[in-house]
Image (tube, coloured by chain):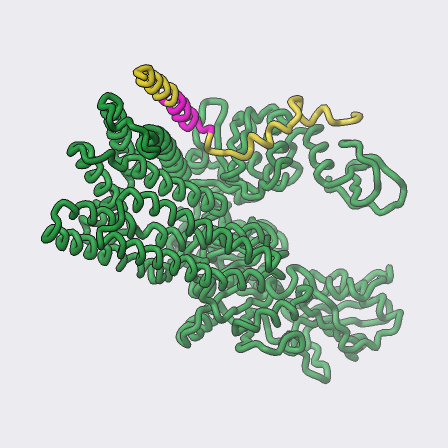
Chain colours: A yellow, B green
């Protein structure tokens, strides 16, 4: 049963790491705008120039 | 070159995207495009951000060094970075178009859109002037707004991030704390195992300290601040209640009588923070405050000895000469010195017909010069404060008096009194139970449900309204809107369609020959009514016009072939009957042969909309125009309480005040700047606009012109908010009453109280959201 103590410590540590990662993400501004990245993924990587048919 | 719409029937293919068809095709430089967007895109892919017309003055000012420095976020020798607010961004295509700017023009280095904030961050080489960049965005359909005061956005962003961090930490503690309390809930016999009991309680205690010191800190700071200035604040019971749970839990743990309620404490703070976060997201989406800079140019062209130079308005001196080009807004009052003053004051007075100004007459700030360039002589040193205050008077929000605030204000002291009284009572009889009762009362009676019901109701309603084209500045305005029982409309641009006039023939004895000649003369008129006449007369003769002369304020005289034609107002030509409204008389060879009146075109279904609104509101009209439309408006809808014409801004304001002094709450719906003072003196002022580019410092909200027909439904929803509030209020009061009575009698465990409390908040939030959505669906707003 005492192994639970270690498990608790491990789980706390893991969760703590995730929390730190989340802090990092917030600081980098990843949560400032939740909508435009979703639109950006739809853009063709080579932009709109390629869409031209002639000229 | 501007694309033109094409009408032939053959099948075509869009040069840009390859779509085939015919409908809506435009031609640009001889090639076909399926839409204006493709044409624009192709032009800029091909030519880069070429600007083929002069950049308007209100963008040009941003090239001045001192303004440039305050407008950009950062700059180096060869590049600068700037953040624009571009409210026109509304879909993924907008994002994709703006973010490909660097590919279209190498001078743009980087562009990133923040969709939620509707901002656009651009860095560009200095060869691309800031004014050109701004104008290009404008031409693309995203008129940018500069943020000269700047750093307010950053402060908002910082508090948002701070809240998110608190929420995450509290969530982390809540989850873990719950996990550690699980064995206890499940009745597993860890209590007998002192090793685990002590580990779990210690961990819980540690987590709860993080929650209190980090997560709940805003509640404590605002509660302490409120106490210091001896004011009641809704956060006081929250802070006190949380402390009580914590103290009680620590006591239980130390005395070995129990396990504490640390998980409930963390849950409580978590749910409170989550509500706050949700609220801030709702608010962020609908903020749209604009500054006066966007309308009035800060700088003007001063005519010096060495030609034109740009100066700031506040640096102008008496007797300076200022040049205003065609179509510019007049930034400063002065007398006309050169050129033809033909000024559209529709922003200021509401009169849609421009006004002719003679030499040495005053031209006032806020008008728009319509014919060529003019020079003004400054007669009085302009003072920015007067310019700004002309349109900016502070608005009295009635939100402070809102009854939920009132209830909350008394709620806190009442709960505190009950808590202390019952604690005192229990100390006298069963001292061991006193703290137990004290914290139970405080926690179960937390006014959160009460406090949440108003912001969530209004927040939800605001969300529904903004989906339907009504953008309110603050949720307090929803509560003002809900009280409205008198609606005052401006006529031009509000009840009527913007920029359209319908000809009405009052008299027409013109022969075919005369008609063509008159059409020819009218088409030469520089007056807008003359142009309207030419349009409604149709075909023109191709004869030369001799002896053409225009008399300002009267009309014009011309000779065509053997005919002498005079066009003009009834005061000049004296027809045999009086004419009201915007009109023009046609006199051929000394006889008035035709009279045309140009009526406003009212919105479709206007009568239905007004009839529907009339059921619950008094309706009035207050217009800056002349009363020519009175009878037509009456035939459309005959229930107006007041019908005022020739109203100046002061008259409109006075009308607001007189309606308010009758104890009614008034909603003003208007457009343009002439309604500004009325918008601010009404309880709720809403500006109607065809695009979001207008300037409305005093409006409490902006209504998109095509959403006007939704007004009855919008008002119904606003009034419904009252009922939603009553439901949620009675629910939370009932809940509090039952909770407190159990708590006071010592029958309520603080644990259950702490679980009940966030539960009640969630119930209220859910109830409110469900009710608002249900009602909105019922009246077709969702």
Q: Nearer the viewer, residue B750 or B725?
A: B750
- Residue span colored magenta: A16-30
The quadrant of the picture occupied by the N terminus of chain B is top right
- Tell me if A15 is positioned left or right of B14 in this view: left
Q: Residue at x 78, y 36 (%)?
A: B29
Q: Nearer the viewer, residue B754 or B764?
A: B754
Task: Give the mark count.
Answer: 0
Can residue B745 be seen in the rendering of this structure?
Answer: yes
- Give above or below for B78 relative to B142: above
Q: Residue at x 52, y 44 (%)?
A: B58
Q: Position of residue A53 (x, y in %)?
A: 79, 26
- Give above or below for B68 relative to B495: above
Q: Residue at x 84, y 74 (%)?
A: B510
Magenta stretch: helix, strand or loop mostly: helix
Can residue B158 be seen in the rendering of this structure?
Answer: no
Q: Position of residue B517 (x, y in %)?
A: 84, 66
- Tell me if B215 is positioned left or right of B127 in this view: left
Please identify the quarter of the rendering in which residue B108 is found. top right
Q: Position of residue B266 (x, y in %)?
A: 32, 36
- Tell me if B676 is positioned left or right of A55 in this view: left
Query: Among all residues in the image, which is located at the extreme bottom?
Result: B576
Q: Nearer the viewer, residue B287 or B728?
A: B728
Q: Residue at x 26, y 59 (%)?
A: B410
Q: Position of residue B731 (x, y in %)?
A: 39, 57
- Tell me if B203 is positioned left or right of B603 in this view: left
Residue B186 shown in magenta = no
């Amino acid at each position: 049963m005492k192994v639970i103590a270690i498990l608790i410590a491990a789980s706390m540590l893991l969760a703590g790491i995730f929390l730190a990662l989340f802090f990092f993400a917030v600081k980098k501004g990843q949560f400032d705008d939740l909508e435009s990245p979703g639109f950006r993924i739809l853009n063709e990587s080579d932009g709109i120039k390629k869409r031209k048919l002639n000229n | 070159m501007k694309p033109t719409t094409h009408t032939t029937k053959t099948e075509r293919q869009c040069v840009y995207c390859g779509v085939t068809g015919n409908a809506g095709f435009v031609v640009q430089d001889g090639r076909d495009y399926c839409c204006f967007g493709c044409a624009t895109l192709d032009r800029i892919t091909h030519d880069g951000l070429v600007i083929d017309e002069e950049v308007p003055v209100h963008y040009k000012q941003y090239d001045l060094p001192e303004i440039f420095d305050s407008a950009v976020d950062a700059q180096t020798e060869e590049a600068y970075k700037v953040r624009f607010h571009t409210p026109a961004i509304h879909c993924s295509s907008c994002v994709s178009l703006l973010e490909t700017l660097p590919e279209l023009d190498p001078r743009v280095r980087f562009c990133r859109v923040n969709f939620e904030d509707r901002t656009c961050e651009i860095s560009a080489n200095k060869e691309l002037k800031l004014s050109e960049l701004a104008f290009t965005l404008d031409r693309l359909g995203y008129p940018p707004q500069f943020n000269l005061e700047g750093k307010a956005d950053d402060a908002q962003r910082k508090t948002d991030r701070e809240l998110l961090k608190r929420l995450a930490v509290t969530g982390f503690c809540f989850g873990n704390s719950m996990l550690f309390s699980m064995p206890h809930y499940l009745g597993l016999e860890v209590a007998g195992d002192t090793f685990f009991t002590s580990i779990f309680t210690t961990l819980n205690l540690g987590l709860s300290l993080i929650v209190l010191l980090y997560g709940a800190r805003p509640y404590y700071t605002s509660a302490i601040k409120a106490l210091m200035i001896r004011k009641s604040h809704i956060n006081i019971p929250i802070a006190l209640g949380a402390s009580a749970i914590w103290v009680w839990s620590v006591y239980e743990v130390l005395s070995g009588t129990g396990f504490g309620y640390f998980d409930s404490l963390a849950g409580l703070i978590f749910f409170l923070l989550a509500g706050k976060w949700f609220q801030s997201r709702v608010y962020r989406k609908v903020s749209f405050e604009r500054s006066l800079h966007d309308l009035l140019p800060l700088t003007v062209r001063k005519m010096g000895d060495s030609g034109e130079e740009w100066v700031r308005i506040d640096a102008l001196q008496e007797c300076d000469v200022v040049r205003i080009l065609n179509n510019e807004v007049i930034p400063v009052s002065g007398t006309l010195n050169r050129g033809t003053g033909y000024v559209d004051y529709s922003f200021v007075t509401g009169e849609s017909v421009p006004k002719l100004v003679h030499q040495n007459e005053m031209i006032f700030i806020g008008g728009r010069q319509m014919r060529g360039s003019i020079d003004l002589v400054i007669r009085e040193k302009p003072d920015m404060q007067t310019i700004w205050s002309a349109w900016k008077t502070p608005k009295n929000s009635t939100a402070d008096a809102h009854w939920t605030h009132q209830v909350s204000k008394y709620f806190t002291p009442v709960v505190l009194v009950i808590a202390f009284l019952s604690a005192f009572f229990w100390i006298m009889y069963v001292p061991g139970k006193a703290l137990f009762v004290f914290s139970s009362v405080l926690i179960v009676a937390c006014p959160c449900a009460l406090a949440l019901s108003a912001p969530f109701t209004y927040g939800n309603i605001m969300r529904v309204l903004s989906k339907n084209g009504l953008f309110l500045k603050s949720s307090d305005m929803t509560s003002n809107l809900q009280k409205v029982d008198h609606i005052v409309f401006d006529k031009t641009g509000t009840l009527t369609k913007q920029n359209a006039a319908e000809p009405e023939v009052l008299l027409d004895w013109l022969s075919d020959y005369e008609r063509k000649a008159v059409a020819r003369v009218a088409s030469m008129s520089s007056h807008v009514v003359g142009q309207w006449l030419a349009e409604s007369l149709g075909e023109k003769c191709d004869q030369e016009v001799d002896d053409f002369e225009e008399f300002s304020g009267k009309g014009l005289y011309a000779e065509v072939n053997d005919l002498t034609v005079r066009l003009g107002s009834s005061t000049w030509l004296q027809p045999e009957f009086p004419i009201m409204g915007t009109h023009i008389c046609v006199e051929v060879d000394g006889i008035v042969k035709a009279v045309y009146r140009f009526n406003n075109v009212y919105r479709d279904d206007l009568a239905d909309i007004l009839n529907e609104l009339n059921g619950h509101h008094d309706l009035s009209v207050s217009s800056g125009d002349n009363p020519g439309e009175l009878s037509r408006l009456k035939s459309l809808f005959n229930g107006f309480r007041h019908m005022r014409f020739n109203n100046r801004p002061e008259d409109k304001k006075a009308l607001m005040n007189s309606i308010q002094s009758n104890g009614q709450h008034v909603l003003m719906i208007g457009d343009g700047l002439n309604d500004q003072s009325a918008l601010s003196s009404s309880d709720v002022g809403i500006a109607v606009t065809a695009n979001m580019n207008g300037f409305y410092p005093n409006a409490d909200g902006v209504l998109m012109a095509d959403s006007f027909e939704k007004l009855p439904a919008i008002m119904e929803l606003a009034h419904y908010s009252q009922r939603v509030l009553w439901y949620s209020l009675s629910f939370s009061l009932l809940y509090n009453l039952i909770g407190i009575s159990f708590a006071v009698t010592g029958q309520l465990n603080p644990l259950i109280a702490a679980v009940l409390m966030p539960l009640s908040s969630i119930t209220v939030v859910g109830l409110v959201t469900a009710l608002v959505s249900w009602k909105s669906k019922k009246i077709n707003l969702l």
